[in-house]
């Protein structure tokens, strides 16, 4: 399998979001989807220095090596973000659409401000779609998240949003559940890194 080797071919993905919104489940869903593809492999070993504040999952494909950083607690995310000296290429915000968004979602994004680029290296996964009442509800949540973007220096129309259910993907092999995560991975493989 050809493996990405140059700097431009690797990207660190900071997985953020409120407690219980599905960050760890989504990371596991990514690993599940890619393990079924011959051109990718996932490993819990990463090139990042080991840090007890997060678990790093490296997803290696012929497109790019993506390292997902999944914090073990909100306090650990806060302390990591406040140091603001870590190489982060993409910010992945996970939002539970049943719980919705509020000031806490805004604070999550504001903590990530040192890593957010005006070009829009933000990707949002609107999770727990199985619990959505209807698509209008999800549209509203998407709009409110976009409303927070200017406070972190990004135009509200930038950033890419996906809608899906990480736990449904983990619990079944229905390809319909995999689609949003596959699309999100395609997006993460294309966002420019410097
Ligand atoms: N219904 C439903 N439940 C989900 C989905 N994704 C995750 N969950 C559940 O939500 C709960 C929290 O998921 P986690 O992945 O642990 O959330 P987290 O953001 O990593 O939580 P912390 O690390 O504690 O902040 C678990 O019980 C998951 O099974 C989903 O798409 N639908
Ligand atoms: Mg977690």
Image (cartoon, grey):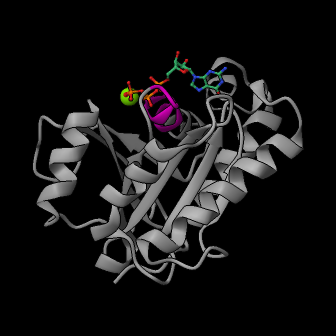
Q: Is residue 3 visible?
A: no
Placement of the C terminus among the 4 image quadrants: bottom left
Q: Is residue 191 magenta?
A: no
Residue drawn 65% across and 55% down? 144
Percent x, y for residue 137? Answer: 81, 41
Q: Is 190 drawn above or below residue 19 in the view shown? A: below
Q: Is residue 24 magenta?
A: yes
Percent x, y for residue 72? Answer: 26, 30
Residue drawn 40% across and 47% down? 15
Residue 130 in which image quadrant: top right
Q: Main secondary structure of the magenta part?
A: helix
Is 185 situated left or right of 165 in this image? left
Residue drawn 22% across and 67% down? 87
Q: Is 152 drawn above or below residue 192 in the view shown? A: above
Percent x, y for residue 84? Answer: 17, 64
Q: Nearer the viewer, residue 23 or 32?
A: 23
Q: Is residue 121 visible?
A: yes
Residue 48 in which image quadrant: bottom left
Residue drawn 59% across and 69% down? 159
Residue at the far front in the pictured view? 103
Is 13 situated left or right of 165 in this image? left
- Total number of numbered discs in the rendering: 0
Q: Nearer the viewer, residue 175 or 159?
A: 159
Q: Which residues are magenta?
A: 20-28
Percent x, y for residue 171? Answer: 66, 17
Q: Nearer the viewer, residue 60 or 75?
A: 75
Q: Is 152 drawn above or below residue 14 in the view shown? A: below
């Amino acid at each position: 399998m050809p493996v990405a080797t140059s700097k431009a071919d690797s990207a660190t993905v900071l997985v953020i979001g409120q407690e219980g919104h599905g960050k760890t489940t989504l990371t596991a869903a990514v690993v599940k989807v890619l393990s079924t593809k011959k051109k990718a492999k996932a490993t819990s070993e990463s090139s990042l220095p080991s840090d007890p504040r997060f678990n790093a999952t490296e997803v290696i494909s012929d497109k790019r090596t993506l390292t997902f950083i999944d914090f073990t607690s909100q306090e650990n995310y806060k302390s990591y973000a406040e140091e603001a000296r870590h190489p982060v290429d993409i910010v992945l915000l996970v939002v539970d659409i049943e719980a919705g968004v509020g000031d806490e979602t805004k604070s999550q994004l504001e903590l990530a401000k040192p890593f957010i680029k005006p070009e829009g290296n933000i990707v949002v996964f609107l999770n727990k779609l199985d619990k959505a009442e209807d698509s209008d509800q999800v549209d509203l949540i998407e709009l409110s998240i976009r409303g927070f973007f200017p406070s972190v220096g990004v135009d509200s129309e930038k950033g890419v949003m996906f809608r899906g259910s990480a736990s449904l993907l983990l619990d079944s092999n229905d390809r319909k559940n995999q689609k949003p995560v596959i699309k999100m991975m395609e997006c993460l493989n294309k966002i420019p890194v410097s």
